[in-house]
Image (cartoon, rainbow, N blue to C red):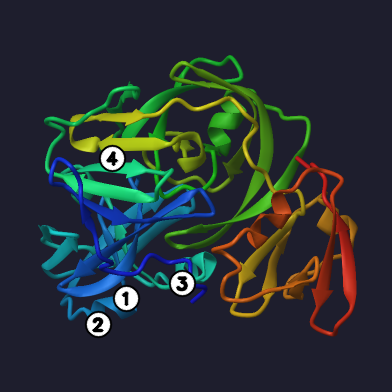
Amino acid sequence: MSGIMPTPGAGFEKAADDREWMTFTFWHEDTILIPVAVNGVRTTAMMDSAAVASVIDLAFAATAKVPLSSVSQAFAGPGGKFAASRSGELLVSIGASPMPLPWAAVVDLSQLSSALGGSIGFILGQDILRNRVFDFRFDTNKFSVRSNALGLDTAGLTELSLARGVRREPTIEIEIEGREPVAAAVDTGNSSPLLLSAAYAKRAGLSPKRSSTGLSVTANGLSTNRLVTLDRIRLGHLDMADVPAEIFENWTADGSPANIGMPLLAGRRLVFDFGHDRIWRSPLTAASLRRDRSGLGIAAEVDRLVVVHVASGSPAMAGGWKRDEQIFEVDGQRIGPSYNSGDLWRWRFRPAGTLVSLKMKDGSVRHLRLGDYH
């Protein structure tokens, strides 16, 4: 593990209104990871509001003594359709808030754990999220869970009303490059600003000047997608320019043709009340969203970065980079367990024109000049 995960079952403090304030990790500023316990066994969970049902890792299910069943469940998402077995009954606890579930989908989450540099034992889906109110404070990395929004102080926050898609997923209208508004799934498990189905992009006549390729981790494996930059989108009262987006050719989600992720949701504070189809958030700025300028898709291991994808037309492709190459230092700083928890991971997002020195397995040093490529 890289040390970036919240300590499962970590201690908490009491808020003024007697709620529990617990610590969460905002991994790479785009993924919410929180401590939970399943049948009393602690683990780290990812919050995924687009998941209709919660998911338990196959190996962790055995550790937590969660019974398995012979019943199979079909799922569909942007990355494809897949089937998973159901577990038996289980008890999920977030702090002092226990929630019994009749079942969860049982899936091998090892690829997700590898991508996040730690062990993910559980994914919180709508079966849990719509029964609690979650209040996240990103300036302090604290969150609380409550049964309802009565007495919740939302002063200074903007309320956004949600609808529900055909799979009962939470949705919100988004306007893309002046086209008719479209319902987009609100997906806290999506680390990209915006995902689009290729069919919608074609139907809407979206034709970005440049595009590239990217690699995404989905519930049923890895997916290679098209990376583009949209000139303008409108979400609520916020207009944003130059928004990075991913277009999925094999989009099989039965619901919305678009999906907005945490980069378009998170501010200083974010409150989810999915049970009443609403969220509150602090104002967002229209500042440019963070984007990769290297073209290297990488997996962080204990003492190295392993290249898992080289984006087409990127600085990395121009520099002759290949899959499976290994990086041991970035600008003289060694890759170690703290890579994801400090600031070193930000090197791929530095301004265009930045020259980065990368030390390889054989001791040689390669230089990569960052640049915009989509």
In the image: residue 31, left or right of residue 63: right
10 Å crowding of disc 2: few (<14), some (14-19), many (20+): few
Residue occupying the point 37% across, 41% down: 254
In the image: residue 248, left or right of residue 54: right
> Which is nearer the N-term, disc 4 or disc 2?
2
Q: Which of marks 3 and 4 is in front?
A: 3
Q: Which residue corresponds to mark 2?
A: 62
Q: How far apart are marks 3 and 2 (CA)?
A: 18 Å
> Which is nearer the N-term, disc 3 or disc 1?
1
The three-letter amino acid code for the residue at tag 2 is Ala
10 Å crowding of disc 1: few (<14), some (14-19), many (20+): many
In the image: residue 292, left or right of residue 143: right
10 Å crowding of disc 4: few (<14), some (14-19), many (20+): some
Q: Which mark is residue 118?
A: 3
- Measured as percent of width and height from the top left, residue 261 is found at 47, 41
Mark 3 vs 4: CB contact within 8 A: no
In the image: residue 283, left or right of residue 272: right
Q: Distance between the residues labelled 3 and 4?
A: 30 Å
Mark 3 vs 1: CB contact within 8 A: no
Q: Which of marks 3 and 2 is in front?
A: 3
- Measured as percent of width and height from the top left, residue 81 is found at 41, 55
Q: Which residue corresponds to mark 1?
A: 58
Q: What element carries label 3?
A: loop
In the rendered image, the residue lying farthest to the front is 16
Res 202 seen here: yes
Above or below, 67 against 177 in this view is: below
The three-letter amino acid code for the residue at tag 1 is Leu
> Which is nearer the N-term, disc 3 or disc 4?
3
Q: Which residue corresponds to mark 4?
A: 167
Res 71 seen here: no
Q: Distance between the residues labelled 2 and 1?
A: 7 Å
Choose top left, top right, bottom left or bottom right for residue 365.
bottom right
